[in-house]
Amino acid sequence: MRVRSPAGPVTVQAIAGSYVVLLGIDVTPDCADGLLGFAIRRTDHNEGERHYLTNFRTFKVNADRQERRQSSFFNPFQAFLWGDYGAEPEHVYTYEVIAMYGRPGKLEPGHSAVAHVITESEDRDQHAIFFNRGAAGSQAYAARFHNRSPRDVPYREAYKWLSRGLEEALLRFIGQAHEPGLALRAAVYEFQHERVLRAFRIAADAGADVQIVYDAVPRKADDTAQKNLAAIREAGLEQLTIPRRKARIAHNKFIVFSRRGRPEQVWTGSTNITEGGIFGHSNVGHIVRDRAVAESYLQYWSELAVDPARIDLRAYADTAIAVPRGRPRRRISCVFSPRTGSDALDWYVRIAEGATNSLFLTAAFGLGKQIAPIFSGQRDYLRYLLLDTERGDVEAVRREPGNMVVAGARIGTGGWKDWIEERLTGLNGHVQYMHTKYMLVDPLSDTPVVVTGSANWSEASARINDENMLVIRGDSRVADVYLGEFMRLFNHFELRGRAPRGRRLPATGRSPRGPRGRLYLNEDSRWAESYFEPESSKEKERLLFR
């Protein structure tokens, strides 16, 4: 849902997902003079609560005044794009954005703008979208659970917080198959989380027809097949599972639900069936309730179930789904791999090259050579890239002035004095922060495009591995949910990427730091100058979200 305030000296556009509300703020040039930031007051009409949003950064004068710590009324946000990451689905909110002037310690409210929004439902109509928390290290986790492993927190409270509904949604999806006449067909890569395996067992015991294709490919550097088999035996699922041995990587993560022989729904996305996949690094589960889409997935599953050689599966994928030459024509398109050529990757590039105002992409394993060109050369719009870790192959991408690049990070030892040290959950090995694979093209337009699924942006994912992707056109609700989650993590990691590490303070020149690594707000309006500098990335962001 997108709502703009009436025109005035201060304006705000609220973009509401399910758990995130983005606030794109703008002011007239005369209001920028002396501007110290924005206080944001939220009214939750469902709960009858009203308060100012929290700002972890403070003015120096407020650093040791507990009554003024963290309130944006005393420590306003010095940005023209801010997010409320504590929103709840299906809530009615009013946001009042107030321009603040004066001096630190004695601020004076100026003009304001108001927006009323209703956050999206996670599960409504054709699409249900569930993102886990995905903040592998965060102030909230450190404060709530004292950086303990979720395995050591009683009553699964840490798991519930990290899941943020992802595990629950997956269990509900499987739990639909609760009697004869209902069926589940799954294709999975890492298949080890005991609660999910037990849900499949319960469905089968209730009379549902359950069959699961799983990765059983022996690989020297990977014991996924052995772990899968051990978990399957422990759960008593041997009779319900089909080993996939002739793939390089059987990387799918989807489940088809059918009723009386008719496929109705598909669960897909990036989430592996492991503790790390569900509760650790960032992942999404996406349900599509569309019989044509579910039928396509079921036919693909039937091909996987006979453990075909790659050449045979390529022949099926090439002919079953014809990749369009231009922008997507259907509201929902499916793409399956492996394919003979790079036509799928080429199509994603063409979609991205058709952007007119913005591009957003997550990449767990960096950028393949086919997809990297979409971040090269100058554009009139911004391109955002969210990575799992810093990689040398994106340095050229980072140097382009229109590219906004951030990698996973946390506040570690030697961070800012007034911030709690953050630690990872310990649930993930190779990929610590970002595991999603999605691209958003012009998400704030009337015809947004969302590409999401299991495939990384690489030739191997397109031509070698078993993969599936969805291309969704023209659905603003889907785009708003994905965009909110993208910016939640982008802003989370962007700030942490500036944190001191060890005894060294990074010389970015972006924010003043006090002694012993504290991070303070700017004490005058110079912070806002870059947002009005023609053709700067900050100006482009202000204009995009306003």
Image: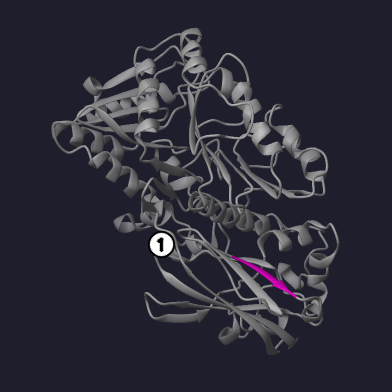
Q: Is residue 59 above or below residue 289?
A: below
View extreme (right): residue? 534
Q: Which of 321 and 217 is in front in this view?
A: 321
In the figure, is residue 456 to the left or right of 313?
Answer: right
* Label 1 environment density (alpha carbons within 10 Å; few <14, some 14–19, many ≥20): some
Q: Is residue 423 left or right of residue 509?
A: left
Residue 25 lies in the magenta-colored region: yes
Image coordinates for residue 328, horizontal then vertical, percent = 57, 34
Instruction: Tell me the magenta residue range.
Output: 23-27
Using the image as rendered, state which of residue 446 and residue 200 is in the foreground: 446
Where residue 395 appears, x then y in whole percent? 78, 40
Question: What colour scheme was applied to this rendering of the protein?
Answer: one colour
Q: Which residue is drawn at 46% across and 66% down?
A: 87
Residue 374, x across and y down, in percent: 73, 36
Image quadrant in which the C terminus is located: bottom right
At mark 1, the secondary structure is loop
Q: Is the magenta stretch mostly helix, strand or loop?
A: strand
As for residue 303 lying within the magenta part, the answer is: no
Q: In this view, does 379 lie to the left or right of 362?
A: right
Q: Mark 1 points at which residue?
A: 89
Three-letter amino acid code at disc 1?
A: Pro
Q: Residue at x 24, y 23 (%)?
A: 240
The residue closer to the viewer here, 78 or 348, is 348
| In the depicted structure, whether residue 317 falls above or below residue 423 | above
Looking at the rendering, which quadrant does residue 375 occupy? top right
Q: Using residue 333 as the reference point, say whether residue 99 is left or right of it.
A: right
Percent position (x, y) of residue 417?
66, 69
Q: Residue at x 54, y 54 (%)?
A: 137
